[in-house]
Amino acid sequence: MRAVAAPLQLEFLDLRHFRAQDLRTLLDEESALWRERLHWDYSGSANLLLQYVDSHLLIGYVAIDQGKVCGYTFCVQEQAKAIVGDVFATRTHANISAAAVEKHLLDHLLETLRATPGMERIEAQLLLHRHGEHHPSFVQAGFQQYQRIYLGSRLEHLASEAPQERLIQDGALRLRRWQDGDFDAAAHNITAAYAGHIDSTINDQYRSVAGASRFLHNIVRFPGCGQFSPEASWVVLEEKTGVMQALLLASRISTEAGHITQVCVAPHLRQHGLGRLLLETGAQSLRALGCSLATLTVTQSNESAIRLYTSMGYQTLHSFDAMLWTV
Ligand SMILES: CC(C)(COP(=O)(O)OP(=O)(O)OC[C@H]1O[C@@H](n2cnc3c(N)ncnc32)[C@H](O)[C@@H]1OP(=O)(O)O)[C@@H](O)C(=O)NCCC(=O)NCCS
């Protein structure tokens, strides 16, 4: 692909020079695109991001065209690891394409991160951007790319009663709603379920109980991935021991849509219908909360999960990339 030259009038400035109000219009435009493409109300994430911008702690860049903010990118750094949070440029400029501005923002950010002493790992999942859209920036910077898909299933045909907690599989297992004390057991369940899995290559939080705990706290406590819904999140426990064997977590991403942020089953209990039961229960719970759409993301190479989702009526709505750089 041809390199895009930086338009002469563009400037790229450190995000820490800016205040929330400088980025508000751009984020409103981005929120409209999240809604159109993903049925996702991005305003909670945008507000959280703006709070961080005001705290001047985020690493990132802002693109300026003739004195006006026209794009931004940011990342979050945790010791030797950085996660590229987002990149977005306005679609309203007649003279500069959003793709060109986003490319330059990413090139600046990736160069800065790779030159940061001690940096060992950079992850990026740009959910809003289409598969391949920012391929050149990441490939030039030495990243691996993993295609992911965003699936959706309509819920209008489901009854509106909430599912019941109950014993399943001849009383050996108990299906119950998520409770506040479930963090630790869920972190163990996730770590065991993702051992050797492609998703733990892309996201190293799945590789340790401490990492899975951080993942869970991000999902449950912060609005970055929608508003966590304990009513639509379920766990499966072994009745005799109380050990957690499977879980499904769901968040509201708009008034009409719920997003399954996690579904996993302990390896020894797979292929017995637990994944399907959890997905059906999560979907029914979201319906009972008034949702008409359930969405989820999955890595393209996770064929068995995709087979299960499509057999349950999920269809591809969007395709995006996860990117990974390691030393
Ligand atoms: C994806 C995952 C949650 C599915 O859970 P599961 O409990 O194995 O799911 P199910 O048993 O309901 O269905 C899986 C398969 O078993 C089959 N199956 C279900 N009951 C069965 C039974 N009694 N006998 C034989 N096969 C059965 C299903 O038809 C399905 O077949 P398919 O692979 O051809 O579609 C599980 O594999 C997992 O935890 N994977 C690791 C984490 C992961 O990838 N999560 C999804 C990330 S997006």
Image: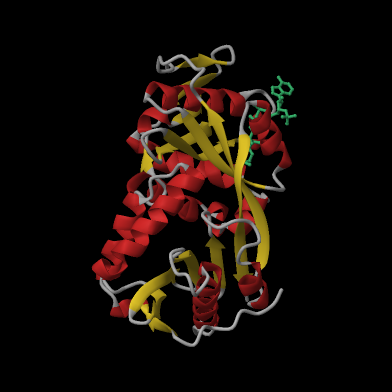
- What residue is rendered at 25% in x and 72% in y? 19
Give the position of the C terminus as an image quadrant. bottom right
Residue 239 seen in the current view:
no
Residue 115 seen in the current view:
yes
Q: Position of residue 201 (x, y in %)?
A: 64, 58
Residue that sits furthest to the front in the current view: 94
Considering depth in this image, is 226 or 29 the residue closer to the camera? 29
Query: Residue 204 falls in which quadrant of the image?
Result: bottom right
Q: Position of residue 312 (x, y in %)?
A: 63, 26
Q: How is the image coloured?
A: secondary structure
Residue that sits furthest to the bottom in the current view: 8
Considering depth in this image, is 4 or 263 the residue closer to the camera? 4
Q: Examine the rendered structure and indicate whether residue 88 appears above or below residue 180.
A: below
Residue 307 vs residue 90: left or right? right
- What residue is rendered at 41% in x and 70% in y? 72
Query: Residue 289 falls in which quadrant of the image?
Result: top left
Q: Position of residue 17 (x, y in %)?
A: 29, 80
- What residue is rendered at 56% in x and 75% in y? 120
Q: Examine the rendered structure and indicate whether residue 107 appears above or below residue 45.
A: below
Q: Examine the rendered structure and indicate whether residue 69 appears above or below residue 265.
A: below
Q: Position of residue 46 (x, y in %)?
A: 34, 56
- What residue is rendered at 69% in x and 77% in y? 2
Q: Examine the rendered structure and indicate whether residue 126 appears above or below residue 60.
A: above
Give the position of the N terminus as an image quadrant. bottom right
